Image: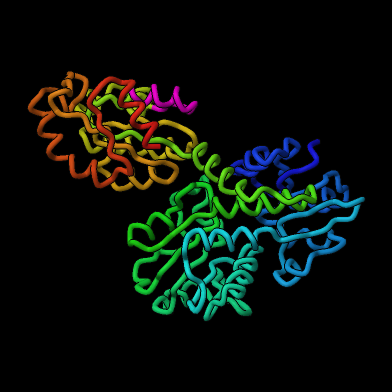
Amino acid sequence: MKKYGLLGEHLGHSFSPEIHHLLGNREYDIKEVSRENLEAFMREKDFLGLNVTIPYKQAVIPYLYEMDEASKKIGAINTIVNKDGKLYGYNTDFYGLLDLIEKADISIKDNNVFILGSGGTSKTAYAACEYLGAKDIVKVSRCRHEDYIDYEELYKRKDEVDIIINTTPAGMYPNNDESPIDIDGFMNLKGVIDVIYNPITTKLVYESKKKNIKAVNGLYMLVRQAVVADEKFFDKKSDEKINEEVYKTILNNKMNIVLTGMPSCGKSTVGYKVAEMLNKEFVDVDTLIKERYGDISHIFETEGENRFRDYEEEIIREVSLKNNAVIATGGGSILRDNNIFHLKQNGKIFFIDRDPEYLTPTSDRPTASDYEAIRKRYRERYERYCDTCDEHIDGNGSVDEVAQRIREAI
């Protein structure tokens, strides 16, 4: 059994092993433990160091020999070091959250902060906001109790809200369509911090950015706390540059490359080439639709375009849960807002813009079966392609040339 790892209940979504491996700790692994087996696991102490996540950040405290002063004040820990059979607890999340807030350029000082959730990370967020000089800190839980308000009260007080910090699991993989709140009507909202890191862009962050509100997910926090935990595990000081280097590596490794554009612009051929270049999985949405539902032209003829778009949306939602993939979409995938939301949760959208004169009509493309249809669709969709993409790529040229342009844009 590896001597370091992440302790939690359901950990299939975790990036932590990859982060610690990049930090040089190859003895780090997942340690999924059920609630009924937690006591036996903690008393056995068959580990040298642990990170601790939901739902055990408070539950492990009775098994500790000692906690540092910061952890005592917070009332939650996320790092344990076994020193000669005695367990010492630390809260490295505190440092991770402080650095995340600084990187996001979200000001806590003299602002009203509303923290969603009542678990260990909520306590960490409270301590961080106190440290940063928040004007008022309000804790929000599903049920009103002690010093927590409920969500009904939150909506009544939404004009008071300057900053929201989400510490709940709402929106975490695989429940990517969820959000802890609806931010419509929060007119004074200046910043949103979501500690969830998978998906890379939660629904809460996505909706906030659409309203031009500063919003950030928890990936940088995860990396930073891991660096500090690694220092605790091995009693060392890390290189100052390691945090940024690991963060960028993890982000690039997890980010999907999504290709949009007109039929026959080269999304599939270029996508396959890009996947080879970047060592990513290649996924073709149209191919998956054909495998599950049959010939696309037949679907259009017998069930209609709207039903085809339903099938397409279903497939896109599924493939968008992936990490480290190149996803070639159909020409009309950008027509539905839900598709854009799903594709951007773990990906960046690259619009391959190939001049209509170089696009080839074929009988198996119902919306681009002749040159007139292609030119018509190009005019209808061009603005939408531009508005929904993160990178606009010149699609004129060879497969290798376009693939290289995408690689350089990344």
Residue 335, quarter of picture:
top left
Residue 394 spot, x, y in % from top left = 25, 32
Q: Is residue 279 above or below residue 12?
A: above
Residue 12, quarter of picture:
top right
Task: Kindly identify the residue that appears in the image at 39 percent across and 54 percent down.
Answer: 206
Residue 64, quarter of picture:
bottom right
Q: Is residue 116 above or below residue 146?
A: above
Residue 7 spot, x, y in % from top left = 72, 48
Horizontal relation, residue 96 to residue 388: left or right: right
Horizontal relation, residue 373 to residue 5: left or right: left
Q: Is residue 71 above or below residue 397?
A: below
Q: Choose between 9 and 51: the one closer to the eye.
A: 51
Does residue 271 show up? yes
Residue 362 spot, x, y in % from top left = 18, 19
What are the residue bounds of the magenta stretch?
Answer: 270-283
Residue 354 spot, x, y in % from top left = 21, 29
Name the chief secondary structure element in magenta.
helix
Task: Kindly identify the residue that appears in the image at 40 percent across and 37 percent down.
Answer: 410
Q: Is residue 186 above or below residue 2?
A: below
Q: Choose between 95 and 296: the one closer to the eye.
A: 95
Task: Kindly identify the residue that appears in the image at 43 percent across and 35 percent down.
Answer: 319
Q: Choose between 291 and 206: the one closer to the eye.
A: 206
Task: Kindly identify the residue that appears in the image at 52 percent across and 47 percent down.
Answer: 198
Q: Farthest residue in the left direction?
A: 372
Question: Does 282 appear in magenta?
Answer: yes
Q: Farthest residue in the front direction?
A: 240
